[in-house]
């Protein structure tokens, strides 16, 4: 009596194209993961971290949560704790001094916001064109020539010194056009003479005295 051999299941047929495509995808995924892992390892070995820098000029008193920033990768070593890392919480803080574009945001530049002692922001129009390259943080003097009501103006007199520019018509501020418009940040005691000159239609001139920083 002959022996009956068991029937073996048929071998599953795989399409060569599908196998090749899956292998290519897997290879690409492995390469991407390897590159990311290498970059992370390099950063860890070099001690580099992401820190905040000012994207543009910023005036003193600007709330940090309104500061436009970008990040830069640096190895600051033992000084790393003196700077704001990317993702740091900035609520309740404001700039204690002006920043230029590209300045690293240092923790000593930040002071707690005090609603009772905030600078007053005034928007004014100057009689003459503003100084060139005026930007947030620039210190200016304000001069006013008294309007006699008949189209004539007296001798210019200084009404405020070392006033900080908060914004101009060319930057983010209260206005959109007009080259001689300016937003300033002033202490409470300077508000009255400046507003008096504005309401009296005196001829106000802006004289730059120093730049950012």
Image (tube, rainbow, N blue to C red):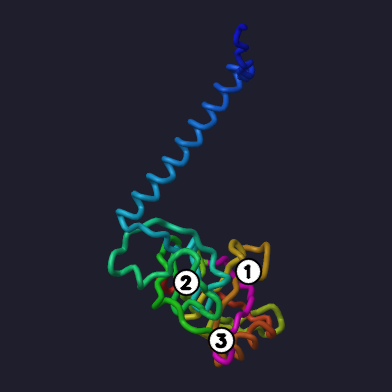
Disc marking residue 118: 3
Quick one: label 3, few (<14), some, or many (20+) residues within 10 Å? some
Disc marking residue 149: none
Q: Decide: marks 2, 3 in contact (CB < 8 A)?
A: no
Residue 133 in view of the camera: no
**Horizontal side of residue 92 vs 10, given as left or right:** left
The extreme top residue here reads 1
Between 182 and 61, the one nearer to me in the picture: 61
Looking at marks 3 and 1 on the same chain, the residue that comes earlier in the sequence is marked by: 3
Q: Is label 2 or label 1 in front? A: 1
SS for callout 3 = loop
Q: How many marks?
A: 3
What segment carries the magenta color?
115-130
Residue 91 in view of the camera: yes
Q: Decide: marks 2, 1 in contact (CB < 8 A)?
A: no
Quick one: label 2, few (<14), some, or many (20+) residues within 10 Å? many
**Horizontal side of residue 89 vs 83, given as left or right:** right
Q: Decide: marks 3, 1 in contact (CB < 8 A)?
A: no
Where does the image place residue 149, in percent across and percent down from the top left?
71, 84
Residue named by callout 1: 173
Between 5 and 70, the one nearer to me in the picture: 5
């Amino acid at each position: 009596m002959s022996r009956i051999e068991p029937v073996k299941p048929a071998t599953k047929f795989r399409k060569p194209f599908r196998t090749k495509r899956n292998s290519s995808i897997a290879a690409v995924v492995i390469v991407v993961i390897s590159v990311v892992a290498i970059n992370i390892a390099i950063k860890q070995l070099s001690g580099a971290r992401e820190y905040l820098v000012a994207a543009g000029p910023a005036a003193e008193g600007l709330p940090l949560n309104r500061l436009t920033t970008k990040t830069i990768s640096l190895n600051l070593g033992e000084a790393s704790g003196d700077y704001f890392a990317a993702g740091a919480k900035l609520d309740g803080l404001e700039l204690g001094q002006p920043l230029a574009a590209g300045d690293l945001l240092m923790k000593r530049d930040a002071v707690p916001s005090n609603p009772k002692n905030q600078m007053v922001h005034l928007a004014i129009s100057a009689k003459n064109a503003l100084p060139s390259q005026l930007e947030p943080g620039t210190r200016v003097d304000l001069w006013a020539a008294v309007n006699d009501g008949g189209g004539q103006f007296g001798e210019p007199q200084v009404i405020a010194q070392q006033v900080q520019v908060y914004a101009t018509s060319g930057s983010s501020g209260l206005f959109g056009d007009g080259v001689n418009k300016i937003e300033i940040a002033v202490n409470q005691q300077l508000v009255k003479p400046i507003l008096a000159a504005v309401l009296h239609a005196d001829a106000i001139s802006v004289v730059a005295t120093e730049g950012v920083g």
